[in-house]
Amino acid sequence: MSARLIMKLRVAEARFITDDTLLLRLVHPSRPQLPAWTAGAHVDLVLPDGKVRQYSLCGDPAERGSYTIAVKREEAGRGGSAWIQESLVEGALAHVSAPRNNFALAETASHHLLVAGGIGVTPILAMARSLAAAGASFRVHYCARSAPTAPLLEELRDICGERLSCWFSEDGRRFTAAAIEAPRDEEHLYACGPLGLIDDLTAHALSLGWSPEQIHAEKFQALRDEDFIPEDFEVELSSTGQRLHVPASSTLLAVLQAHGVPMRTSCETGICGSCICDYSAGDVIHRDAVLQLAERSHRVVPCVSRARGTLTLAL
């Protein structure tokens, strides 16, 4: 784990909002306020075995007394969601990090187009809440199997009103990327949900003339490619000129740590963004699920990403 602040928070509320999604409201046992956060931020939840899971905050950023997350039970997952739903009852204590935001709203945008798929609604809800409070121009597309299975639907309806479009596949309304049109000036697109949804949406938006700087996405899964074969590469540290060899059997992060380079770590699966660092030259093989398109030309996630030839890190 990194030196990131980890707090012991108490579960003040635990209730199911759909058959498989648990809403948790977390408070500090003795302090009235928690560290501030902005819409799009997530927290790390540290499990008893030391493993880490990331959950987007879906409450009100203006409310500093608690953090709210929603945890969907993933039957085919790694067991984290099952443990959380079974163990984090009201009164239980949870180890939670201070918030980090890799999915922030663009301050200069004239209009915000938000797309949520299933449990991907969590950061989108916080974004809609902040935009509505600021009187900003925005619209939300929410796609799910059905209204009863759509987490936080009523909250989103209350906030958005006519600015919300719902796409429920069981009702014959399935969202497709074709619902997105060419961008207006200074319009920004945000998407959170399954990998397929985000990949299709991103490709379609780029084909319509959206720039990488206008597209923001957050995925809940790291890239999985069973056919990917890692190869050796070299890394150079620009601050010292030191050159290190990264064998196919190791990660860039592990090599940096083994040579005394201080690195913050958390999930080590390319999701949380703790270990992101800059690079100034090299051909990077991006395998993370956290960097925005516009960041990939100069930033790398060393826990999962690799390079061809020599990579020069700005460390």
Image: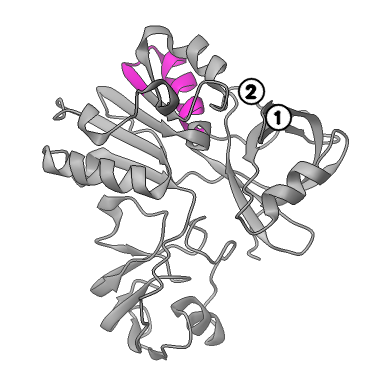
- 191 in magenta: no
Q: Which residue is mark 2?
A: 63
Magenta span: 123-140
Residue under the image location 36 percent in, 28 percent down:
114
Callout 2 touching callout 1 (CB < 8 Å): yes
Give the label on residue 9, or none: none
Residue under the image location 57 percent in, 66 percent down:
265
Residue under the image location 51 percent in, 27 percent down:
126
The amino acid sitting under disc 1 is Ser
How many marks on residues?
2
Secondary structure of the residue carrying numbered label 2: loop
Whether residue 216 is visible here, answered yes or no, is: yes
Front residue of 156/40: it is 156
- 137 in magenta: yes
Q: Main secondary structure of the magenta part?
A: helix
Q: Position of residue 50 (x, y in %)?
A: 73, 64
